[in-house]
Image: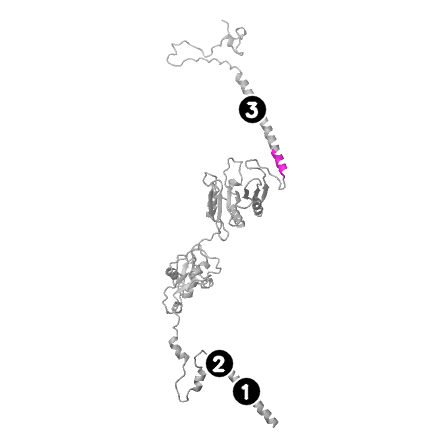
Amino acid sequence: MNMMNNRKYERMTLLCLVAATLWTYSFAVHAREPQGAAPALSARSHAPVGDRTPAPNKVGQGAKSRKAAPAVPETHLVQNGEFLGGIAQQYGVTTADLMQANDIDNPDRIQAGTVLQIPGRDSGETPVRARAKKSPGVVISIPDGLTLTRIAKLYGVSVRAIVKANASLQNPDRIRSGQRILIPGVDKEIELVPPPPCYKPAVEFYRVRTDETQKIALQFCDGRTNPDGVEALSRLSSPVGMEMPFLLHPKLIDMMQEVADAFPGKRLEIISGQRVAKSKGNESYHNKGQAMDFRVAGVTTKKLVSELRKFKNAGVGYYPNSVFVHLDTRERSAYWIDYSAPGEKAIYGRADMTAAEIEAIRAERRAEAAAREREDKAHFSQQLKAEIELAMQPEPAAAPTRRTRKKDSDESAAPLETSSAVPAPAERTSHTPAPAERTSHTPET
């Protein structure tokens, strides 16, 4: 009996566990279904066998709510890093058509966020690239100033595709102006626009003597010297009241760009640039367009000099008692310190030179100048005395003039006058013999 009771108890326990499990599962299913909606499983299980009405079909119900296939967009929003050629290739149109449809003059000047109209695209139309036939390409003549990368970008093709289509292009970096190449996959030639020049940020210059300010781009982005910048800075640094005598040296232009890079946003103030030599032996680097006296606004001359001394093949002059520094380009680097004040003769010295030593040099120069002044005064006095003595001497008597025989028509009427007249006895010269000293061959009268 006990064994039978135990078995019944185990069966009842097992049935309770199964019932509890089923109840829990049913509750979870009902909790996940929307409120007020009949579960599909319950509808099927309670439907009569003879009822052939199909159960609600979500697929059938969605026939009315099914959305039409999205239409092909007629516009394109430009993203960062996209270019016009790539966008044209994406939609199967040419760069020229895309430029014309959006009134674009320069394909490089498109900004992120710009909405482009895609030409020849109607809503729901089959994409152009899906129905367009493959074009064999066009043959173009490479214009001057364009690279193969630039040409590929404008046409919306890859450089690799152009190189593959042209056996003569062994090196894509070596193309020449006028060379004819095949651009594959395009159907017409477009106008190739050279890229706009890229300049480094313009440097602000200020000319102290004329109170003139000008911003000048000295270099291109690749570090080449800008010829227009050379001419502009040469004019700004010309002597006051003169036309530009010559151009500044390109190396000096590059140095000024390095100064601007070392002190970004600072204004460079020109004290003296080009100079015209007054005499042949008085020439300097200023007379050759290789030097500039300047300062940087907000920067001490000492700090500026420490930066300039890093330049190669440069002459750097430091003037502690002035407000500018000197910079020139030369074959070998040089550095000097000039302790002179403005308008004073140069006083070159060491970096650790004291004020007493500088003043001693000035005193020595003053003494030398005073001695030279005394010598000049003494020399002037002697010269003045000599001129006075010469002026006090009597003037010598004038020598008599000789009379000559007339040679005109009245010669016979006039008394004969010999040109060898004997001078008066008092005025006889030493070489004329006296009457008592006549020679023996002179006949006596």
Check disc 2 and report its element: helix, strand or loop: helix
Q: Magenta residues?
A: 354-362
Locate residue 6, reporting x and y percent. 60, 91
Query: Is 231 contained in the magenta span?
Result: no
Q: CA distance from mark 2 to mark 1?
A: 20 Å
Q: Do residues under tags 2 and 1 come within 8 Å of each other at their CB atoms?
A: no
Amino acid bearing label 2 = Val
Check disc 1 and report its element: helix, strand or loop: helix
Left or right relative to 35: residue 370: right
Indicate the quadrant where residue 75 lies.
bottom left
Locate residue 97, reporting x and y percent. 38, 61
Numbered circle sitting on residue 29: 2
Left or right relative to 318: residue 53: left
Q: Residue 77 or 10: which is nearer the viewer?
A: 10
Q: Residue 120 or 5: which is nearer the viewer?
A: 5
Q: Earlier in the sequence, mark 2 or mark 1?
A: 1
Toward the bottom, the furthest residue is 1
Viewer can see residue 184:
no
Q: Is residue 363 above or below residue 119?
A: above
Which residue is denoted by mark 1 in the rendering?
Answer: 16
**Residue plotted at (56% across, 88% down):** 14
Viewer can see residue 213:
yes
**Residue plotted at (56% across, 22% down):** 383
Locate residue 209, reporting x and y percent. 48, 40
Q: Earlier in the sequence, mark 1 or mark 3?
A: 1
